[in-house]
Amino acid sequence: MKKLNILLLFAIASFVACKSKSGSNDDVQSIKFKFTELGRETQFRITCDKFDYYFPEGKEKNFNKKPGIDSVMQLLTGMKMVSDGTEPDVRGKIYITLTTKNR
């Protein structure tokens, strides 16, 4: 469990450069983390948009209950987007699904 928590925190930090949509926590229906091994080495940098291509077999962790969604959104809200053209070498991806009433 501790290893998963560390992995999730690292995954959140790695995704700051990926595009995100703004909205309140009430607008969020679910959050899905798709990730691979934290220490997995590659010969080149894996960008956010190429993650699914290079790691199609990734593991998944879903949050679809309000307490879990609120905790994840609180962590994400405190992060800053990378806007200087830097592309991190990612090992996971975050998918945020908004409720249909707000689309």
Image: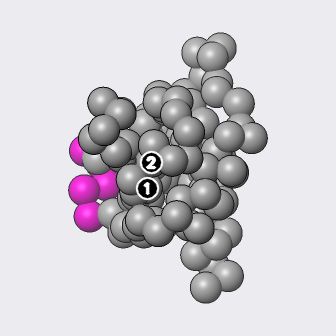
Viewer-proximal residue, 19 or 103? Answer: 103
Q: Nearer the viewer, mark 2 or mark 1?
A: 2
Which secondary structure class fits the magenta region best?
Answer: loop
Element type at mark 2 = strand
x, y (%) of residue 7? 60, 66
Q: Position of residue 34 (x, y in %)?
A: 39, 58
Q: Which residues are magenta?
A: 53-57
Q: Which residue is mark 2?
A: 28
Tell me the distance, in whole angstroms, between the alpha carbons under discs 2 and 1: 8 Å
Residue 27 coordinates in the image, percent (x, y): 45, 43
The C terminus: image quadrant: top left
CB within 8 Å, label 2 to label 1: yes
Q: Amino acid at mark 1?
A: Ile
- Which residue appears at 61% of the width and 85% of the height? 1
User: Mark 1 highlights which residue?
Assistant: 31
Picture colour scheme = one colour
Residue 54 in magenta stretch: yes
| Quadrant assignment, res 17 | top right
In the image as oriented, which residue stretches furthest toward the bottom?
1
- Which residue sits at x=64%, y=27%? 81
